[in-house]
Image (spheres, grey):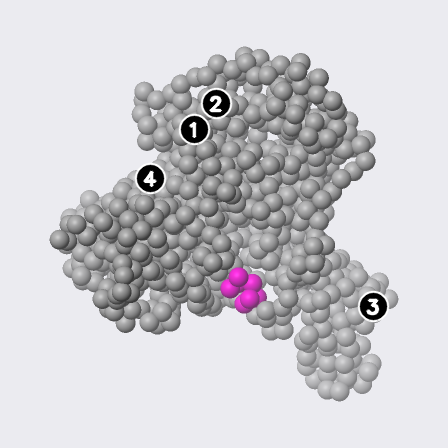
Amino acid sequence: MGWIGKSVKRSDAKSKVMGAALYIDDYGYEGMLHAATVRSPYPRARIKKIDFSQAQKVPGFVRGITAKDVPGKNLWPLVMHDYPFLAEREAKFAGEAVALVAAESLQAARDAAAATRLLLEELPCVTDPLQALKKSAPRVYGRDNVFARYVVKKGDVAKGFEEADAVAEGIFTTGYQMQAYLETQGMIAFPESHGGVTLYGSMQCPYYVHDAVAAALGIAYNKVRVVQRSTGGGFGGKEDMPALVGTHAALAAVLTGRPVKLIYDRREDFISMSRRHPSWTQLRYGAKRDGALTACQAKFILDAGAYATLSPIVLWRGTVHAAGPYRIPHVLIESCAAATHKAPCGAFRGFGQPQSAFAHESLIDELALKLDMDPLDFRLKNALRVGDETATGQKLGESCGMVDALEEVRDASDWKKKRADYPAWKSGGARRRGIGVAANYYGVSLGARGRYLDRAAAQVQIQPDGTVMVAIGNTEIGQGARTVISQIAAESLNAPYEHIQVLETDTSRVPDSGPTVASRTTLMSGNAVLNACEPLRRRIFETAQEMLKKKGGAETPMSASDGKFSVAAAEVGFAEVARECYLRKLKMAEQGWYSAPPTSFDTETGQGDAYVTYAYSANVAEVEVDAETGETKVTKVTSAHDIGKVINPNAAEGQIEGGIVQALGYAFIEEIIEREGQVVNPNFTDYILPASADAPEFKTILLEHPYPAGPYGAKGLAESPIIGPAPAALNALRHACGVRLSHIPAMPEAIWKAVKHGDQKKQ
């Protein structure tokens, strides 16, 4: 292969490093207004009146907008259709949008929003998910405050525990985590003369924005155009939420007849946008004396917040993976997403799996200790292999690297020696060392629950000078999608990598290709690009062969690599061939399409093929803990990932290292403090993020178990790196100090208290 497997330079590297890339707030247009949002200050309130009289006195005020002004449907068409674009009768969380104001300047818009008077009646609320599930709780959604319920039932779990010689059980909880993208939410909307609207903005999923705007304005889909601009991070937070921001901007633009910019400040982003779901998991495992797992039973609850957004899908992924990447004959997983009077939770890298993985990997360690087995050996004994069935009964027929991943991290981390030596290590003070492991598997793309969205489109056009334009429906949000897609196109066409340009995503160019989530871009858009390239490749290669014959090339097989075609001593370049194709009036533009293979899944039992394929990974974390302060430093993480075929090794390693740091923030320092539904630390001063000094030493291992249906055997990577490092680090903490912390983030005070209590029990 020419371009596949090479660490080529990122296609967008220069523009971003040089500061040439333009983000949405860099744009300004003549006659453009600014919008600001008026928000409810209460977790729950009845809206009695919205008064713009004082706002109208602010110099530059143009218009106020309420739910009554929405010309179409005031319900966001996302999964449950329960979230109003603007609260109408009742606001269900502190920070919910109640009204909009448009003004001549940003300051005027913010001043007018602050001057808008809300007459609200504060109502009883519920902010704890377990309390929300009680019959006596205030109603947030429906009759029972449940957005979704799922079950995975395999075998007979009671029988499985009867067969067990050892049982481990526990309750594990996780807190919020903010996506913490550096660029806050932002959109610019332009009213069009044909009665439609064009939007530019920071986003992951342009068609989510497209469909929401069409619904709110009550206009045809072909009157809405959405274009993604350079996006300063997403991590899931710009999957669904830009649809809300974009709809607000579009409403203001259409109702004023002028372009409107809407940019959130950091506090506003914190209190109103989605974040990772807090979770509560009650889990049991059973195993025989030889270490073979017999049963797994779990209750898994997510705190969804006031509106469903993507919670049903997040819950489903967390549920079907909740037993872990293990061979278990008897499984019962029951889950629900509880509605509370808090900001809605939604998509975040890992999508429900970091929560369930923290529980299952913590308890797997405890069961190994009960059996007096090495935790890594225990995982190896039970790890999924080709031919095994997952908890959903899906038989793994190919591309399963779980065992390889565990063996690689075991050897690369010097696991056996450190596991034996670290408990006796002394620093001369109170510092202790530990090493821990975690395993996980990740269903690539959307799976059975999202199968109707699991498709992708692409357009590929070869220019007369040999340059190539590629348009896809998925987006570049910093993950390197344009680079990988460029490599796939270059490989297929035998074009120079530098000649490939992947265009900004535009709904007027490419059909809906599903969301840019779930590690699906390489698999889905990559296959769509290959589908488009196939006829182009045939024309290019046939033309090159004929050109070489005219140059006296021998009747031998033609070789093609690095943008050149050759037979014996004769050679032609890709640009020459492209020019000849145009002279021959050959079609040099094609559209490609790819849809995921069908999955068969029974939602009543949770049995069937949940995903078309899986990525597998294992992480070994090493920690140093100061027992006198609780301060914990993760010193090294060894991580192995089976991602099918590696398209770009440097990009893959970057994804893994970034995911590790993000996971360690989740494990130890990122904490949203909320009191009675109010976020009290909505900023980067008080919500602490890991910095470069917090990054551990990385040892990254890329494993290749090619997936035959993937582009050149690739599967997907981006989500998986954030799932395993947190439980691996907490397992290392357990090894270092002998105490199990069952909640993350495990803040220093909690660690100190646990270690102190554990030391006292030993005395």
Q: Whole-percent x and y of residue 415?
A: 31, 69
The amino acid sitting under disc 3 is Arg
Residue wearing tag 4: 280
Is mark 4 in CB contact (under 8 Å) with mark 3? no
Q: Residues within 10 Å of mark 3 (few under 14, many from 20)?
A: some
Residue 37 to residue 710: above or below: above
Q: Nearer the viewer, residue 258 or 756?
A: 756
Is mark 1 in CB contact (under 8 Å) with mark 2? yes
What's the distance in space between the residues labelled 2 and 3, CA to CA? Answer: 65 Å
What's the distance in space between the residues labelled 4 and 3, CA to CA? Answer: 62 Å
Residue 579 is tagged as 3
Residue 515 to residue 139: above or below: below
Q: Give, as a single range, the part of the protein colored magenta.
A: 647-654
What's the distance in space between the residues labelled 1 and 2, CA to CA? Answer: 8 Å
What's the distance in space between the residues labelled 2 and 4, CA to CA? Answer: 25 Å
Tell me the chief SS of the magenta region: helix
Q: Whole-percent x and y of residue 713?
A: 53, 65
Residue wearing tag 1: 677
The amino acid sitting under disc 2 is Tyr
